[in-house]
Image: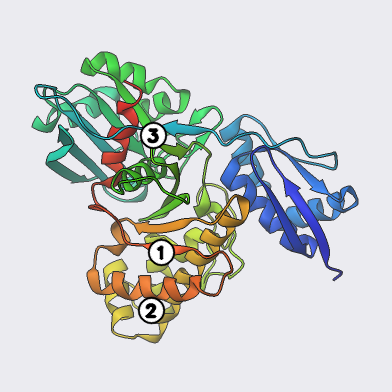
């Protein structure tokens, strides 16, 4: 197929792509997942119809485009007009977690599909934390939860007593219209999720708890926490991938700012196809980065390829450290996907530093092995990306970052 030299341009970012229409369509999907829906200009204009046809083949049921239309309130629309001037990247500001003597504590909360983490912070220090398992998949105890039950879950713990503000990190994508509770864990998930989806939850919780409450995407929160933990100004943006059941992504753009773009990197299509391709539970695409990096998909792939029907993610980690050929293959695929993802973000703006965080890296031997694989893969790309170790406790970072983001808005 004849190669094409093209550029795809959205509202906030632009990318040059060399390759056939299928490659341009794949990168178009990735661009939208980072910066959101709306008009995407294709240049040269003569290539738009070919790219549109290739997009139809990658998204044959229109599920990815329909999801973005619902989430953002506007469609993904390919145009052949002159690209508009790029808009500045929207940001959220945050402040260090300090406080004068006598100031009441803050509460940071991280809510995922499987865990609820509360962190009590006083004068910039974590004084206590608590974690509750919420189940898995549609069995999460948040599915269908009422506002009253949710409040009891929070206020029933002494960590929430006498606080001056609350920041909540949700596993919920951000769009131009706010956080959207559109995932397999939360869609149609009851009163709390409905309020989050309509943008009313923070005001309702503020009235109920008697202090300001602000909600954030968990990728934004963990990026804020990592930036806060690194004193001094940064020369480069800091991309943080929080690896869990799926994975969250955040981009710190300075000492006290994080990107407010969607950064839905788990929905991107990497060039390296994952060992097993599953339908993404939200957007329906097969072969997304989630398949290579998310614990749910990695565990499922490991079980399928090894005929171990009860194996979990921890067993996969142990097998990878022990040199099991299947687990090693999965780890290398994951490392390659991390490197590709960081390179893609660098191509959109400027070279980034990279931090890997999250529950998937709790086991030290596996973390050491996996980060070494990632470093090797990064050397194969021209971006000059540096992999940094997490600066703080990865189990607390999303809750801490949510508190820091909320402090700047209180």
Q: Secondary structure at mark 1?
A: strand
The residue that appears at 47% across and 49% down in the rendered structure is: 237
| Display colour scheme | rainbow
Q: Which residue is at the front of the view, 224 or 107? A: 224
| Quadrant occupied by the C terminus | top left
The label shown at residue 387 is 1
- Position of 169 with respect to 4 (left or right) is left
The spot of residue 311 in percent (x, y) is 30, 72
> Could you tell which of marks 1 and 2 lies nearer the N-terminus?
2
The spot of residue 279 in percent (x, y) is 54, 57
> Could you tell which of marks 1 and 3 lies nearer the N-terminus?
3
The residue that appears at 45% across and 70% down in the rendered structure is: 335
Q: Is residue 311 above or below residue 176?
A: below
The spot of residue 159 in percent (x, y) is 12, 32
- Specify few, some or many for label 2: CA neighbours under 10 Å numbering under 14, 14-19, or 20 or more: many
The residue that appears at 18% across and 27% down in the rendered structure is: 99
| Circles 1, 2 touching at the beta carbon (< 8 Å) | no
Q: Which residue is mark 2?
A: 327
Q: Is residue 130 above or below residue 70?
A: below
Q: Is residue 225 above or below residue 329?
A: above
> Could you tell which of marks 3 and 2 lies nearer the N-terminus?
3
- Position of 82 with respect to 35 (left or right) is right
Q: Which residue is at the front of the view, 380 or 112? A: 380
How far apart marks 3 and 2 lie (CA) works out to: 34 Å
The residue that appears at 53% across and 69% down in the rendered structure is: 274
Q: Which residue is at the front of the view, 307 or 183? A: 183
Q: Which residue is mark 3?
A: 216
Q: Secondary structure at mark 2?
A: helix
């Amino acid at each position: 197929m004849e190669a094409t030299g093209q550029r795809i341009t959205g509202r906030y970012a632009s990318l040059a792509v060399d390759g056939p229409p299928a490659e341009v369509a794949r990168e178009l999907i990735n661009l939208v997942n980072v910066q959101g829906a709306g008009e995407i200009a294709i240049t040269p204009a003569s290539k738009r119809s070919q790219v549109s046809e290739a997009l139809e083949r990658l998204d044959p049921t229109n599920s990815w485009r329909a999801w973005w239309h619902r989430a953002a309130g506007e469609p993904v629309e390919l145009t052949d007009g002159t690209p508009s001037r790029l808009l500045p990247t929207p940001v959220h500001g945050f402040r260090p977690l300090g406080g004068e003597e006598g100031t009441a504590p803050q509460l940071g909360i991280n809510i995922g599909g499987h865990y609820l983490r509360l962190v009590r912070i006083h004068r910039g220090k974590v004084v206590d934390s608590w974690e509750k398992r919420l189940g898995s998949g549609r069995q999460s105890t948040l599915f269908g939860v009422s506002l009253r039950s949710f409040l009891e879950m929070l206020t029933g713990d002494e960590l929430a007593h006498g606080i001056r503000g609350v920041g909540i990190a949700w596993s919920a994508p951000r769009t131009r219209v706010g956080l959207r509770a559109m995932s397999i864990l939360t869609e149609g998930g009851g009163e709390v999720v409905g309020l989050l989806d309509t943008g009313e939850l923070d005001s309702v919780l503020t009235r109920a708890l008697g202090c300001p409450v602000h909600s954030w995407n968990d990728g934004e929160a963990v990026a804020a926490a990592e930036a806060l933990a690194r004193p001094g100004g940064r020369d480069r943006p800091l991309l943080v991938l929080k690896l869990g059941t799926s994975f969250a992504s955040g981009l710190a753009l300075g000492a006290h700012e994080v990107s407010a773009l969607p950064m839905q990197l788990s929905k991107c299509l990497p060039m390296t196809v994952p060992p097993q391709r599953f339908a993404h539970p939200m957007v329906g695409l097969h072969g997304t980065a989630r398949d290579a990096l998310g614990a749910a998909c990695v565990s499922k792939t490991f079980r399928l390829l090894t005929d171990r029907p009860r194996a979990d993610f921890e067993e996969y980690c142990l097998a990878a450290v022990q040199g099991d050929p299947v687990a090693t293959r999965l780890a290398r695929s994951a490392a390659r996907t991390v490197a590709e993802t960081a390179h893609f973000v660098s191509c959109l703006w400027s070279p980034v530093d990279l931090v890997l965080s999250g529950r998937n890296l709790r086991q030290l031997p596996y973390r050491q092995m996996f980060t070494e694989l990632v470093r090797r893969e990064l050397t194969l790309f021209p971006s000059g990306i540096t992999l940094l170790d997490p600066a703080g406790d990865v189990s607390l970072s999303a809750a801490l970052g949510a508190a820091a983001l909320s402090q700047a808005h209180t």
